[in-house]
Each structure stands twice: as structure tokens, then as C-alpha cells.
Image (cartoon, grey):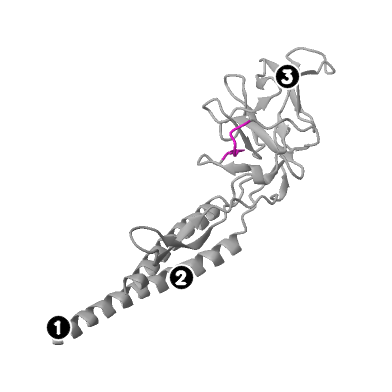
């Protein structure tokens, strides 16, 4: 009897975990360049004393949906979207190099080039610092960051750094709890000159809201089924106890 209860209980637990993943995807349906998380669970034998006669559901981490989101034109010269595959290197705030496709950039009060999440953009020579004051700042499709100092002639543009653009294989990167991606071996990816930017545009989230809602409905029904199985297991146990008392 406990075998049935064990399977139903662990199944209900993983259903709730999956609902949380799908709910997080829905919450980020409008987040710039968000990559939807995938959910998956499989049957696993429980090992302990004696033979592994119990089976439970175990969550796996199949990764994320790396498909590109739609490109939305903004016309803002500090908005950049990556064409096709690739990532922008940023500092996670703890001195670690991480990767994102969020190209909504701005110059902070400290002169550092940052994205809309406050993460400092990295260049070929480390964090990109913009010497102030300036009259203009231009980002090229190859990642070059050029400025025109205040009062300088209109054609006096100077390249101060280049945004580090990388393109590691999707199978070699994973998402952290902060939403940023990193290499699985915690190394730094090499810059890739083939990665290009589209200026004046942003990549939208690749979350399909209708698909996520459909998955959530199916998961909630599975959860209800598992709860009913647990109640049935409890009822069967009570009836078995009553039969034993009668005998």
C-alpha cells in the first residue's frame, strides 16, 4: 500500500515544482531577452536498506529554451539586440563573468556601461568605463563603443572599448539563480568576432504565454490526480485495518 502512496506523494511534489517553473516563465513573458526554463521529471528507484522496491519522481534540469525572441525596434541608440546566436558578457556584481542577451544599456552615474538590470557590461579590457562628459555615444554592430567628448568636432569619434560578445555552445552553458548564464566549467568564454549586434532594437522574451498556460493546466490536473491517489491509499489502509480487527 505504501508503494502507491510513495509514488503519488512524490508525483504531487514534482507537479508543484513544475508549476513553479511555468509560473516563473509566465511572470517573465515581458522580460527583455528572457529564456524560458524547461521542466522534466522521471521515475527513480529509492535505494536504502533491502531491495529498491520503492519508486519516486525526481526533477531533472533539461535546461532552457534557447530560441531567439522577437526583435523589437526601439530607435534608442543604446538598445542593442544580438543577431542570431551569441551573448553579451557582463559582471554579475561579484567579479564573475556572466552572459546575457539583455541589450538595454545605459551609462551609470559612475560612468560604467550597464544594462537595465544594473550589471556592468564587459569589454576587451574589462568593465567598460565611459569618460564623462560626452556629447555622443555610439555602439557599432561589432560591439565597438565610440564617444565624442563634449565640445569636440562632430567627426571626432573615438573608440574607447568593444563589448565582449561570445558564442559558446548552448550545451556548455547553464542559467544561474540570478538569471545570468555561465559556462558549466566556470571558465570564461572567448570573444567571437562573428557575433553581431542590431542597434536600436531589443530582443523580447521567448516565452509562449499560451503554451505555458496549457502546461500549467495539465500540471494542476496531474496534481489533483495524485492527491486523489493519496486519499485512495489512505482509505484502503483504513479498510484493511478494519478487516484485520474483524478477523
Front-most of 230 and 180? 230
Separation of residues labelled 2 and 1 (CA atoms): 35 Å
Tag shown at residue 135: 3
Separation of residues labelled 2 and 3 (CA atoms): 59 Å
Q: Nearer the viewer, mark 1 or mark 3?
A: 1
- Quarter occupied by residue 164: top right
Asked whether, in this view, residue 4 is left or right of residue 173, the answer is left
Relative image position of residue 161 (x, y in whole percent): 73, 21
Q: Earlier in the sequence, mark 2 or mark 1?
A: 2
Tag shown at residue 222: 2
Visible residue check, residue 10: yes
Q: Residues within 10 Å of mark 1 (few under 14, many from 20)?
A: few
Q: Residue at x 54, y 65 (%)?
A: 215
Q: Earlier in the sequence, mark 1 or mark 3?
A: 3
Q: Which residue is mark 1?
A: 245
Q: Nearer the viewer, mark 2 or mark 1?
A: 1
Relative image position of residue 115 (x, y in whole percent): 61, 32
Front-most of 127 and 147? 127
Which quadrant: the C terminus? bottom left
Visible residue check, residue 128: no
Q: Residue at x 51, y 69 (%)?
A: 218
Identify the secondary structure beneath mark 2: helix
Residue 205 lies, with reference to residue 82, above or below; the image says: below
Q: Residue at x 77, y 37 (%)?
A: 195
Give the residues drawn in magenta, as a range: 180-187
Amino acid at each position: 500500500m505504501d508503494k502507491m502512496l510513495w509514488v503519488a506523494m512524490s508525483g504531487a511534489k514534482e507537479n508543484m515544482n513544475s508549476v513553479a517553473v511555468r509560473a516563473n516563465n509566465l511572470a517573465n513573458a515581458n522580460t527583455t531577452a528572457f529564456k524560458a526554463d524547461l521542466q522534466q521529471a522521471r521515475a527513480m528507484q529509492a535505494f536504502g536498506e533491502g531491495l529498491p522496491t520503492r519508486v519516486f519522481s525526481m526533477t531533472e534540469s533539461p535546461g532552457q529554451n534557447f530560441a531567439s525572441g522577437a526583435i523589437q525596434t526601439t530607435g534608442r541608440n543604446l538598445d542593442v539586440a544580438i543577431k542570431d546566436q551569441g551573448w553579451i558578457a557582463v559582471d554579475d556584481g561579484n567579479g564573475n563573468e556572466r552572459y546575457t542577451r539583455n541589450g538595454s544599456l545605459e551609462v551609470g552615474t559612475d560612468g560604467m556601461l550597464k544594462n537595465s538590470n544594473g550589471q556592468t557590461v564587459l569589454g576587451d579590457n574589462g568593465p567598460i568605463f565611459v569618460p564623462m562628459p560626452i556629447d555622443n555615444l555610439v555602439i557599432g554592430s561589432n560591439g565597438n563603443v565610440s564617444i565624442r567628448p563634449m565640445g569636440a568636432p562632430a567627426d571626432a569619434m573615438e573608440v574607447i572599448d568593444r563589448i565582449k560578445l561570445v558564442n559558446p555552445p548552448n550545451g556548455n552553458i547553464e542559467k544561474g539563480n540570478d538569471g545570468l548564464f555561465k559556462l558549466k566549467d566556470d571558465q570564461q568564454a572567448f570573444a567571437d568576432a562573428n557575433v553581431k549586434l542590431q542597434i536600436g532594437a531589443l530582443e523580447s522574451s521567448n516565452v509562449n504565454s499560451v503554451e505555458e498556460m496549457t502546461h500549467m493546466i495539465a500540471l494542476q490536473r496531474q496534481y489533483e490526480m495524485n492527491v486523489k491517489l493519496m486519499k485512495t491509499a489512505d482509505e484502503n489502509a483504513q479498510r484493511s485495518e478494519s478487516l484485520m480487527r474483524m478477523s
